[in-house]
Amino acid sequence: MPEFDFKHLAVRFFNDSKLNKRKTAEQGRAIYDDIEMVEIRTAGDPKSTLVAPANGPSSVRHPDTNQRLTYAELHEGPYEAFKKGQKFIGSGTPLKELPFLTEARRKELEAANVYTAEALAGLDGTPLQRLGMGARELKNQAQAWLDKAAGTADATKLAAENAALSDRITQLEAMMNTGVTVHQTEVADADIPTAPSPFEDWDDDTIRLWIEEQGGKAHHKAGHDKLVQTADELNAQLAKASEAA
């Protein structure tokens, strides 16, 4: 299923009933059928509302089959939440997370079908103007908040990766200080071990770092297989030197 950006929409599925004219005529009394419906509202435009059968065809076609997608297929997240009896306010950060919004302003935004920081940051043109004075500043504040949050997430990820690499280096140094080499199998006449390389599952940066720590050299353009081979050869030399000591 292709991914679509619906941050500017507030989508709600609900149960309704519809008069079954054929069964009503046949039985001489009103007969109703249960039917799943969808309500779609546009952020920034409280007057823009679409109500249609959930399994009715939308105007969006599948890029591979060219078949019209139903509203239930098009809005999988809200529809899944509806089937589970849960509330779906949109994919994104709820407005309550924005520290610069007052409670009154938040309610005004929600009344205009704006429920997330992403929806607020994405407003422009007429929908943004409908929010009145200060709307542009709120939009910019929301975008700045999202940018900062994204930067914090990247920094946290980088810090975690650096910590993991540091732990790996510490382990390697501890092994070398105790005279234990990474490769513990006996080395025959050949310099390259025949057993599966212990370096195979290491990432390239860690292999390069290990090689340099042991006084070896690894070409910066060397691929993974070449790095593994270089590390194996160096490790074999270290094993021989350890046995001779």
Image (cartoon, rainbow, N blue to C red):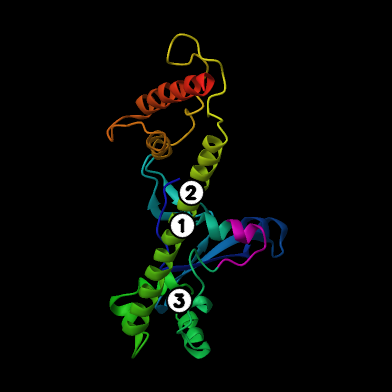
| Closer-to-camera residue (233/41) | 233
Res. 159 mark: 1
SS at circle 3:
loop
Does residue 23 appear anywhere in the picture? yes
Q: CA distance from mark 3 to mark 2?
A: 44 Å
**Residue 73 rendering spot, x and y as whole percentages:** 50, 51
CB contact under 8 Å: marks 3 and 1 = no
* Amino acid at dot 1: Ala
Res. 166 mark: 2
SS at circle 2:
helix
Residue range (magenta):
80-88
**Residue 186 rendering spot, x and y as whole percentages:** 55, 15
Location of residue 106 with respect to 9 vertically, above or below:
below
Res. 114 mark: 3
Image quarter hosting the N terminus = top left
**Residue 133 rendering spot, x and y as whole percentages:** 33, 91
**Residue depicted at x 51% and y 19%:** 244
